[in-house]
Image: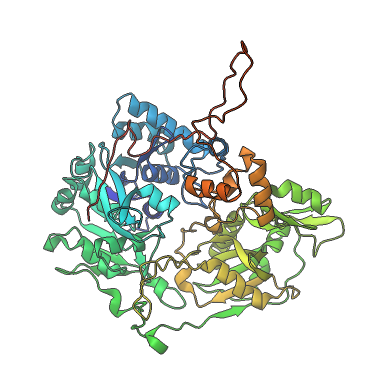
Amino acid sequence: MKKLTVLSGGMGGARFLQGLRHGIATGAIPGVAPDAEVTVIANTADDWWVHGLKVCPDLDTVMYTLGDGIDPGRGWGRRDETWSVRAELEAYGVEPTWFGLGDRDIATHLVRTQLVDAGYPLSKVTEALCRRWLAGLPGPPVRLLPMTDDRVETHVAVADEASPSGRRVVHFQEYWVRLRAEVPAETVVVVGLDDSSPAPGVVEAITEADLVVLPPSNPVVSVGTILGVPGVRDAVRATAAPVVGLSPIVGGSHVRGMAAQLLASVGVEVSAGAVGRHYGARAAGGVLDGWLVDEARRRPGGGGGGGRHPVRRGAADDDRRRRDRGDGRGRGGPGGRLMPTLTVTAPDGVPEVRAGDDLVALLEPLVELVDGDVVVVTSKVVSKAEGRVVDGDRDTWVDRETVRPVARRGGTRIVRNRLGLTMAAAGVDASNVAAGEVVLLPLDPDGSARRIRSAVARRLGVNVGVVVTDTAGRAWREGQTDIAIGAAGLVVLESFAGRVDAHGNELAVTAPAVADELAGVAELAQGKLGARPFAVVRGRADLVLPPGDDGPGARSLVRPDGADLFGYGAREAVVRAVAGDPADRAPFGSPVPRAELLEALARAGIEAFPPTTVPRTAPRAAGSAARPTAPAWPPSWRSRTAGSPRHPATASISG
């Protein structure tokens, strides 16, 4: 096979493409030539206009990922990103504050917007941008195509008691970024899809391919929208090439993104079999010849490969016979649930760690690792091995590591540090080091975890997940516990949205931070004074990602500044609100609604004037010049987003 075509969304599709190209280049995929061309048809229904710029999230994620420019921790945006423009826009009060564009990323959107405004179609613009990122890549050549040159936008209907219809429609980006997909999606509306046409080269890439692949991207708002472009589904049905899909659902939850939340909106159960039936077999009018389901992550102890399941006429593989359904009626222990055995081993005998020490070499003789293990390492030994022990006064280093203060009580300072973590003393530690020295957190804990995982795989031939931990306090509770500040090869957050409990109640927002839970259980075995910096957790192989997929990292668990409901301590919030410094605006998050603010001022006996009026003052002396008044602050600006006069796009839902 010389020509492969992939219908891709963003993060899930991009990571799959990385593995696909690696498999082709190494000869690991039988029947595929090492110089086979990969054509990617990317979803563009997530696109939108913000701050006057045309942003194409899925196109950019694929382009950055394959071009080695992606931020490996977040899985989106640019590596080594900075956020100065976002901070300035927030200081001006420009909406939306919940959607951030990094400084490096903005350059891509500026170039794209200039070319689009000059009249070039998106396919030509994408080709121009890809000359920087994809031309001359080592390994199989890649061509990136948008699904259409026409404007298509996904909107999501959600419940809204204030609306006369009882619901409102938001752009997909608002649903995903601002609402975090925590509100059930009632309906998905793709504006402009029916009137669109495939971009040049899209149909030919499908009909002339030797293999067509539907990767583990979202079947509703990624692959589903690509197939929804008139002519694309027909091309997939007509191609002589086999069409193979990979399930985005593993163990009853999505691999990436929000498939679990959105499948319910189209009446599809959250299971691999149900998604396969949703696509359907080509023999029965669907699009699939084969459906691949990853069974390895559902088996205790890991090991083994995925399952290959040909699509039967009228139905895809029904994996409900082989796994716990999550509703209390599966196989296993009480209530029918699977009851895995969890073991935690924290070996003794680890010597004092110094700069340059090989942590994997220290761990190897102490415990035998197997596929599916999770290796938990304290950040202190990682920092020591990476040379993060420094001379100096602790308070001085706390100042250097602090991005902004959060709260202070006596000598205790709670701050947001350079990693985005809110911690006492910025995570600077003066224990277990010589007098006059302190230990700083690792520069890149996710990067540290990736290096440990890679070394284990290379030298021991074992696929493990890795967690780097540190100790932190909890709001509203006494005491501290360990949390994950770095992770690699691991699902760090499990979404239970869309699943049903034993009483038939659908879960909407439950999302266990499993990386933090692993950190906490490992701490029980390690102890604070036991000199046991390593722990191995066995029994959750379902959380360990396949080789080559390091996952989003623990950085993805950190909320952006302003997204937390408690950006400041109670006392500090009052002081900073009264001071009114624009630089303090971001941690407060979304502005308070006008009506709520006016009501609070009225209760305090303060008269509030409308922003377009000026309070009446004493009469001016005759002949004196009138002084201009300052405009109301902040100005009620709105960015050019979907639905703006320049870029109209509307969606309505009746009923």
Would you say 513 lies left or right of 319 here? right
The percent position of residue 55, horizontal first and vertical second, equals 39, 38
The percent position of residue 434, horizontal first and vertical second, equals 85, 60
Hey, which residue is sitting farthest bottom in the picture? 334
Vertical relation: 159 (above or below) 614:
below
Q: Nearer the viewer, residue 385 or 653?
A: 653
Would you say 493 lies left or right of 625 here? left
Q: Nearer the viewer, residue 213 or 364?
A: 213
* Residue 187 seen in render: yes
Residue drawn 17% across the image and 45% down it = 230
For the C terminus, give its image quadrant. bottom left
Hey, which residue is sitting farthest right in the picture? 435
* Residue 417 seen in render: no
Question: Where, by quadrant of the figure, is residue 524 drawn?
Answer: bottom right
Vertical relation: 40 (above or below) 520:
above
Number of marks drawn: 0
The percent position of residue 443, horizontal first and vertical second, equals 66, 51
Colour option used: rainbow
The percent position of residue 626, horizontal first and vertical second, equals 58, 16
Q: Nearer the viewer, residue 601 or 514?
A: 601
Question: Where, by quadrant of the figure, is residue 555 drawn?
Answer: bottom right
Hey, which residue is sitting farthest top in the picture? 623
